[in-house]
Image (cartoon, helix red, strand yellow):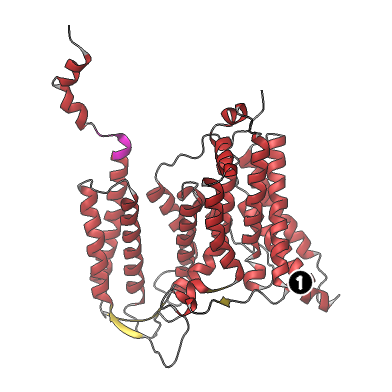
Amino acid sequence: MSTGTDVLAGPAGPDVKNVRDRADVRRQVRFLVIYGLAALVLLGFALSIDNPTVAYSLAPKFDINDPPRDVNGLRIVWITFAITALALVAAVLNRIPRSVWGALISVVVGLSFYVGLTVWYFADQTETNFFITNPLPNTIQYAVPLVLGALAGSLCERSGVINIAIEGQFLAGAFFASVTAALAYSAYVGLLGGAAAGVAVAAMLAFFALRYQVNQIVLGVVLIALAGGLSDFLLGQIPTAGANPSMHEKLTSFETLAPIAIPGLSDIPLVGDALFNQTILAYIAMVSIALVWFLLYHTTWGLRVRSVGEHPKAADTVGIRVNRMRWQAVLLGGVFAGLGGAYYTAGSTGAFTNNASGGEGFMALAAVIMGRWHPVTASLAALFFGLMLTTEDQFGVLTKFPTQLLAAAPYIATLIAIAGFAGRVRPPAANGEPYVKS
């Protein structure tokens, strides 16, 4: 009579050990395709450069006494190709680890491709003398609303409520931040108006999703349309210049948040001006990352929020009021999303325009998915999208790419990042499922 041990010890034993998980195969294929395409494109860049000299400046601001420096761009592109080729070899051998080191390899490959693309784009100029500038300051500025929106999405969806309406919260926050700032003659007060508007939209999301169990995806789309239409309508009600010039000017133009330089830290080369010479809203975003991470993973409240997002019935059996926890998470997320919307008016332009956020609420939602619903990794994904928006601005000074393609580049990068690097991700188990106490 054979036992289970005899079966495992038979000829089938080694074969069982050699069977690969399908997810591992898909992961290897994904890396092979992405790294292979990146290496192929970088090789094409290297072979197409005629004039290897490229000018760059990493200074935070242009200084006539510190002119741009020249560098051998061809050599840099070949280095980036070599780095990507090494990663491709590791993928062929299936040696990309599943740990944080594997993610680090993807980041290095992505940065290498970005550097190679930038150098190639600014090479071979014939009639112009544009140079590469430090992308970090603008990256941080663009990432501020995306980070705040991603934190809002992480809070909502960790509790089990799908928040498609981040774009709507951005629009509402932008409009009411501008109105509040103009009426109070203070952009700082405008932040309170933006946060209140974000909470109002969040309250509508929670009310219809939790009280009436409305489909949360459809509800999110409706709230975006509502916020966009309502803000456009209210903007149209502002008296025109012919009727009351002072009122019109006051409500459409005001002094925005000024950068605050932190002594000593803002003088750090390369990163000092980008990180420590920002507006109060940027500092709020930086602190909020740590705050949300601490709340979700190091407090009893955060444990309860995550439990109602994963298994609400089990949470209910131990006395946790599921819908109350979801209400709290959604409303707190509304504060962050509203502050993110305030960036587009009180934090930057000083005037509200139609579609002020330009669809960046969907980028924030993509950052949540790419970051696997974790506040820290979602914020890093938002930083990546901020870099893509900065690249659009930098590349706009030349015409190697059509203008329309440059405008679409951040959104194309979003699709590639979600499909290529995020892979198959598992949201909270009860995400989008209303809970009715039995």
Q: Residue at x 45, y 65 (%)?
A: 387
> How many numbered marks does the figure carry?
1
The range drawn in magenta is 20-24
Q: Name the residue under label 1.
A: 182
Can residue 362 be seen here? The reply is no
Q: Residue at x 69, y 70 (%)?
A: 188
**Percent x, y for residue 366?**
50, 51
Q: How crowded is mark 1: few (under 14 residues within 10 Å), some or many (20 or more)?
A: many
Q: Residue at x 78, y 75 (%)?
A: 250
In the figure, residue 169 lies in which quadrant?
bottom right
Q: Which amino acid does label 1 sit on?
A: Ala
> 383 above or below 316?
below
Q: Nearer the viewer, residue 296 or 353?
A: 296
What kind of secondary structure does the magenta stretch mostly adopt?
A: helix
Q: What element carries label 1?
A: helix
> 428 above or below 373?
above
Q: Residue furthest right?
A: 243
Q: Nearer the viewer, residue 92 or 280?
A: 280
